[in-house]
């Protein structure tokens, strides 16, 4: 993974000093809240319902054990002993005092971390496939490019006051695990016929109030053109994105209102002009190679594809067998697997981990995964490079720490935003709904019967729970002072990206769990076989049978 | 004593403390307290808005974004009407740490 | 209101805005808006005194490309500091159109944005926010000095390709 050099360290330390000064000026009154707010947002400091919330950047979801231990320390020392992993691969602490933030940022800087640009109308964390560098289906590791984009976008003088936030995601595999089509810029790493590396480029995806799937603007952008092209997109957006209405200010609206063809012409024209005048934006192969060396594959051992140790252990331990079936992902290196650590214990708040659990994962990463862990946008953790032989030991340790739930990708692997329990923007609570749903479907047999199902919950229209791209999505709203929940069906964040459709009128807090179960039971009743997944069945059947099951008059 | 009509407006001023972000309420003696029981209750919209204007002016350093919260008195306790405000008084309805720790202990 | 040009406080602004009604004075430095400039472009060519251009938020350089070299001053207005369009305008003026005159930021110009403005090519700032005036006068306005991308102003390179180091 990327390692800071002196320059990087100087940068982040300067930034900490600058923000410390800004905090002092706020607390002394020299800066009004109105003047301070965009500055603190640039450093990931939100003001939520109960306290300040700090959103720490985890670039493309990659962490070392040292960094995890520091996050654990911060949780214990400055917060209430736990943290929440987010749908953009970041970490949030909910009980922060502003006065402590400069100190926290210094602790983070000591382990090459920060909270820069995790909020505000600027370029946010560049996210990537959480199985990068490991997945068997990968064309190339997207993270060197994510790192190049991260650096380029850090305190970019031209793009710090955009009309609205701007999110980039990169995938290195045709199976898109980074949800690139619901990002402002989505990049798919690929090779052309001659073997040269480049990107398919999508623009204008996003969720929130008006969810939209991105439009492809380039089939193949050579890798050397990455920064010039992104600069062109950002400049067009900065100049022409709407500034009159916060809810119509994302680039997806610009795409929608201008039309992709005209916008593409504007982008291409700007890109051509930039190329001609600013050779400094070109990304030479040597630079890709230099950054790429930080992400070189670790020193894998040569091992057989099948591990007799694991196979034997599976037969003896049904819990391990279940874990292997769900939580291991095929690795490009024989004898290894990418291992998912579910943060979705049955009945527990999704995506949360205690300080102690962070330490456990740090130890396991260090010992069993070449000192590397990942955060997925589905709010789980990943050990990317685990020897199959070691899986029994890893599982035993996870289980003892309450981290061994074998539910990756199942209905109880719920994605949920913090919701009205924590968030000042929310209209309804999401965590208790997630917990009740998890309990309703909690039996392992029931979960297996249902199979792959992505259930995503947002507590308001900002869609931080990514409900628009859930196979089943739930949106919390406020109706006549009560919490109310709308169901959407058929969303998907992968390469077959689709936005879920609202199925009908919403459900009360008392009704919502039954309603979701009705949807699930309808699927089981109508699927062609257990091998037909929920999303496949939905796409074949359409909404009608589900709507009928939910709303038909009771006999 | 004249009995107040049921539908009488009762408003307090709430904000977040600028230093630690905690929920606070304006008292009668111009302090900001974490305890809603100490909040000054205004019984008219006009009075509440006047107080809000004062708060906004004099507390820009101490608190962030003061605003009006409608309350009722139930069994002698001051209680916000809106659910969101109730959560601000009572804290989150979930306690992830407790849940996570008890599940670990059960593992 | 204070005017800082190239880091120094300027006592009196040499420039005046063109009157709303009436002709543009021929004998002194005058700032004119985009619409008026385009309307009177030919007659302004014969002026001897310096000419300045003022761009409001949302105005772009379309139609002005051939004339950038005629301006000794371009003023870009920031109606609110969160409106970042001026940063792109500044870079286009400096880098695309080779503008070498005074590039002035006006409007809601605050201390913490000035380092970004400088890197985009602004060298002159009209400030009304008192604490910003004091900070500038006392030389306390400094951003970070390490940068990850080239900017519109010359900065020392720092080893690797896009890295720059400035005075801060």
Image (cartoon, helix red, strand yellow):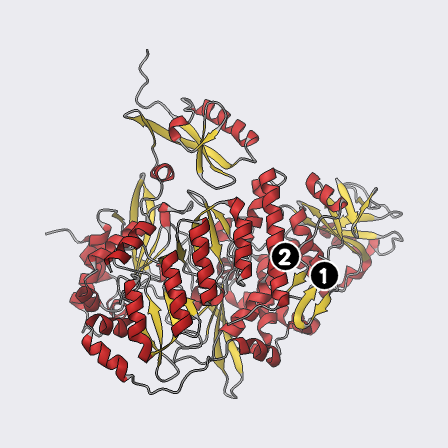
The residue at the far left in this view is A555
Q: Which residue is mark 2?
A: A14
Q: Residues within 10 Å of mark 1 (few under 14, many from 20)?
A: some
Answer yes or no: is residue B95 visible.
yes
Horizontal side of C77 relative to A145 (left or right) equals right
* Image-quadrant location for residue A135: bottom left
A316 up-or-down from A420: above or below = below
Q: Position of residue C99 (x, y in %)?
A: 77, 61
Q: Position of residue A107 (x, y in %)?
A: 53, 56
- For mark 2, name the chain: A
Q: Residue at x 52, y 39 (%)?
A: B18
Q: Position of residue C84 (x, y in %)?
A: 62, 53
Horizontal side of A96 relative to B101 (left or right) equals right
Of marks 1 and 2, the one in the foreground: 2
Comparing A509 with A143, the one in front is: A143
User: What whole-number distance in Å separates the C-alpha atoms at marks 1 and 2?
Assistant: 13 Å
Q: Residue at x 62, y 47 (%)?
A: A21
Q: Is the N terminus of chain B in the top left, top right, bottom left or bottom right quadrant?
A: top left
C130 up-or-down from A313: above or below = above
Q: Which mark is residue A516?
A: none
The residue at the far top in this view is B1
Q: Residue at x 68, y 54 (%)?
A: C115
Q: Which residue is mark 1?
A: C166
Horizontal side of A297 relative to A526 (left or right) equals right
* Tag 2 secondary structure: helix
Q: Do marks 1 and 2 share a chain?
A: no
Q: Is the C terminus of chain B in the top left, top right, bottom left or bottom right quadrant?
A: bottom left
Answer yes or no: is residue C61 visible.
no
Comparing B1 with A22, the one in front is: A22
Comparing C97 with B53, the one in front is: B53
């Amino acid at each position: 993974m990327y390692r800071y050099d002196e320059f990087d360290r100087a940068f982040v330390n300067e930034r900490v000093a600058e923000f410390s000064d800004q905090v002092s000026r706020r607390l002394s009154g020299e800066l009004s809240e109105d003047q301070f707010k965009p500055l603190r947002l640039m450093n990931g400091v939100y003001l939520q319902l109960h306290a300040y919330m700090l959103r720490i950047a985890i670039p493309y979801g990659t962490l070392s054990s040292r960094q995890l231990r520091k996050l654990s320390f911060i949780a214990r020392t400055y917060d209430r002993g736990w943290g929440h992993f987010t749908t953009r691969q970041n970490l949030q602490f909910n009980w922060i005092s502003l006065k402590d933030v400069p100190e926290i940022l210094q602790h983070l800087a000591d382990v090459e971390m920060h909270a820069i640009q995790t909020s505000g109308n600027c370029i946010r964390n560049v996210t990537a496939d959480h199985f990068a560098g490991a997945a068997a289906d990968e064309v190339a590791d997207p993270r060197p490019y994510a790192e190049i984009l991260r650096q380029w976008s850090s305190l970019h003088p031209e793009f710090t006051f955009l009309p609205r936030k701007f999110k980039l995601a990169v995938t290195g595999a045709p199976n898109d695990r980074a949800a690139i089509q619901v990002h402002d810029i989505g990049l798919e790493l690929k090779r052309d016929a001659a073997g040269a590396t480049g990107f398919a480029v999508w623009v204008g995806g996003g969720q929130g109030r008006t969810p939209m799937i991105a439009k492809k603007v380039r089939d193949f952008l050579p890798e050397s053109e990455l920064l010039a092209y992104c600069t062109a997109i950002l400049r067009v957006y900065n100049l022409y994105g709407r500034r009159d209405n916060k809810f119509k200010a994302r680039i997806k609206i610009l795409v929608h209102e201008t039309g992709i063809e005209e916008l593409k012409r504007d982008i291409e024209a700007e890109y051509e002009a930039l190329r001609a005048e600013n050779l400094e934006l070109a990304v030479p192969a040597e630079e890709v190679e230099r950054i790429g060396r930080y992400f070189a594959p670790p020193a894998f051992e040569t091992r057989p594809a099948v591990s007799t140790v694991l196979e034997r252990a599976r037969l003896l331990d049904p819990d391990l067998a279940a874990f292997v079936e769900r939580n291991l992902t095929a690795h490009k290196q024989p004898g290894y697997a990418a291992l998912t650590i579910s943060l979705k214990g049955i009945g527990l708040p999704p995506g949360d981990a205690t300080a102690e659990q962070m330490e456990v994962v740090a130890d396991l990463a260090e010992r069993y995964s070449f000192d590397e862990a990942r955060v997925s946008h589905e709010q789980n953790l990943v050990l990317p490079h685990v020897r199959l032989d070691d899986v029994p030991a890893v599982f035993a340790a996870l289980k003892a720490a309450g981290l061994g739930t074998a539910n990756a990708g199942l209905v109880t692997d719920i994605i949920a935003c913090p919701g009205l329990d924590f968030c000042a923007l929310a209209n309804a609570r999401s965590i208790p709904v997630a917990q009740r749903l998890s309990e309703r479907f909690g039996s392992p047999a029931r979960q297996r019967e249902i199979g792959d199902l992505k259930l995503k919950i947002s507590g308001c229209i900002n869609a931080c729970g990514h409900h628009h791209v859930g196979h089943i999505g739930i949106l919390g709203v406020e109706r006549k002072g009560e919490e109310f929940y709308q169901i959407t069906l058929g969303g998907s964040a992968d390469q077959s990206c689709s936005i879920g459709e609202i199925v009908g009128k919403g459900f009360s807090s008392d009704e919502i769990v039954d309603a979701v179960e009705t949807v699930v039971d309808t699927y089981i009743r109508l699927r062609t076989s257990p091998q037909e997944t929920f999303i496949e069945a939905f796409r074949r059947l359409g909404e009608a049978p589900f709507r009928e099951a939910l709303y038909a008059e009771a006999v | 004593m004249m009995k107040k009509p049921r539908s009488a407006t009762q408003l307090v001023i709430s904000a977040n403390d600028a230093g630690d972000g905690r929920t606070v309420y304006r008292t009668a003696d111009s302090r900001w307290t974490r305890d809603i029981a100490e909040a000054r209750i205004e019984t008219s919209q006009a009075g509440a808005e006047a107080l809000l204007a004062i708060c906004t002016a004099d507390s820009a350093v101490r608190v962030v974004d003061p605003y009006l919260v409608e309350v009722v008195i139930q069994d002698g306790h001051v209680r916000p009407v809106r659910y969101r405000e109730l959560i601000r008084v009572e804290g989150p309805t979930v306690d992830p740490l407790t849940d996570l720790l008890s599940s670990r202990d059960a593992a | 209101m204070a005017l800082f040009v190239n880091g120094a406080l300027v006592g009196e602004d040499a420039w005046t805005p063109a009157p709303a009604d009436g002709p543009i004075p021929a004998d002194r430095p005058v700032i004119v808006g985009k619409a008026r400039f385009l309307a009177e472009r030919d007659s302004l060519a014969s002026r001897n005194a310096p000419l300045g251009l003022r761009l409001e938020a949302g105005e772009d350089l379309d139609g002005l490309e051939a004339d950038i070299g005629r301006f000794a001053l371009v003023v870009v207005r920031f109606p609110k500091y969160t409106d970042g369009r001026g940063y792109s305008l500044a870079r286009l003026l400096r880098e695309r159109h080779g503008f070498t005159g005074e590039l002035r930021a006006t409007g809601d110009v605050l201390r913490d944005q000035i380092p970004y403005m400088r890197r985009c090519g602004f060298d002159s700032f009209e400030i009304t926010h008192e604490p910003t005036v004091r900070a500038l006068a006392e030389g306390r306005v400094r951003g970070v000095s390490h940068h990850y991308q080239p900017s519109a102003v010359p900065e020392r390179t720092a080893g690797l390709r896009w890295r720059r180091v400035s005075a801060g």
